[in-house]
Image (cartoon, grey):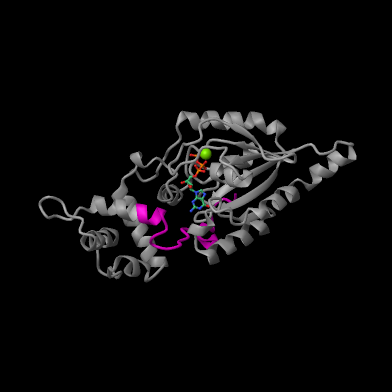
Amino acid sequence: MSETINWYPGHMAKAKRLMLEDMKIIDVVVELVDARIPYSSKNPDIDTIAKGKSRVILLNKADMADAAVTARWKEYYENAGATVAAINARSGNGLRAVTEAIQTACREKIERDRARGIQNRPLRAMIVGIPNVGKSTFINSFAGKAVAKTGNKPGVTKGKQWIRLNKSVELLDTPGILWPKFESPEVGLRIAWIGSINDQILVTTELAEKLLVFIAGRYQGMLSEHYGIGETTEGCEHPGTELLRRIAERRGCLMKGGELDTERAAGIVTDEFRNVKIGQISLETPEDIAGYTAR
Ligand SMILES: Nc1nc2c(ncn2[C@@H]2O[C@H](COP(=O)(O)OP(=O)(O)OP(=O)(O)O)[C@@H](O)[C@H]2O)c(=O)[nH]1
Ligand SMILES: [Mg+2]
């Protein structure tokens, strides 16, 4: 992995062009971000694409994040004037608030229609977000049936797809897109941690080591509780490597010659983090992004 992770294949540039074209017939843009990284998973390009449109921000996968931090993010975006809801698209938790959020965001438009004598024209919502954030899962839960394809890896949805929810709302599912250049290595790192960048282009051990250092620093006691390892790395030149080695030892990750298989341990850490086995972890707070461009 180079200093800055970058992943912007051609199909994402194309998807972005198509989204711009569709914007003409869209009433509201529903933006899904990952509740564990509500800033880093928010595509700055959407601000340009959705210019002038009503917006709703959904903090998805709230079940995986630290609830106290999610509450602060909700407040953060509300203070910035957005309509926000924290949800779990998989279980359907929080979805009832979404209908209301969409109606609130579209209130002006509904009133305009009414003034012109247009009645019951369905609201058209475009569902956008980075790869693997849960767009298709959200659509299925919201629709109450499996209409969109989902999967736990980035790039499942290939083209756009309209889904008619009921008489009053139509949804457009879109492929997940990233942007050409992440503003900092941290943003790229966080997006990689949650699994929105194809793992094949990343170095698992480096990602896992950095994740362990983050968790040991911010969620003290969590690693020792889950892995039964000591967390102090005072005096260690490479704290992340040290933590990963301790986990490899505890989990019996050994290579043929008896050496520690840290690559296998890194795979375990990544999987267990992404399956919320280690704990509910938020990877950034509003303070962490102070000094970054607002979005
Ligand atoms: N725990 C949890 N898992 C979720 C939630 N929402 C989605 N997922 C899981 O996240 C993975 C990705 O979901 P998708 O709906 O395919 O994501 P997508 O945004 O459509 O992804 P692309 O089409 O690749 O851009 C799946 O394994 C879902 O089951 C949630 O709220 N909580
Ligand atoms: Mg999808």
Q: Residue at x 53, y 35 (%)?
A: 175
Q: Residue at x 38, y 63 (%)?
A: 215
Q: Is residue 61 left or right of residue 109?
A: left
Q: Position of residue 41 (x, y in %)?
A: 51, 48
Q: Is residue 15 above or below residue 191?
A: above
Q: Is residue 48 left or right of residue 91?
A: right
Q: Quadrant of the N terminus?
A: top left
Look at the image and give the residue range highlighted in magenta.
271-295
Q: Is residue 263 left or right of residue 194?
A: left
Look at the image and tell me whether residue 177 can be seen.
no
Q: Is residue 133 left or right of residue 51?
A: left
Q: Which is the main secondary structure of the residues drawn in magenta? A: loop
Q: Quadrant of residue 97?
A: bottom right
Q: Nearer the viewer, residue 13 or 230?
A: 230
Q: Position of residue 60 (x, y in %)?
A: 55, 52
Q: Quadrant of residue 244?
A: bottom left
Outermost residue on the left side: it is: 257
Q: Position of residue 261 (x, y in %)?
A: 20, 53
Outermost residue on the front side: it is: 145
Q: Position of residue 40 (x, y in %)?
A: 51, 50
Q: Is residue 291 above or below residue 117?
A: below
Q: Nearer the viewer, residue 255 or 69?
A: 255
Q: Residue at x 25, y 50 (%)?
A: 263
Q: Is residue 125 above or below residue 224?
A: above
Q: Does the magenta-highlighted stretch encompass residue 132?
A: no
Look at the image and tell me whether residue 170 can be seen.
yes
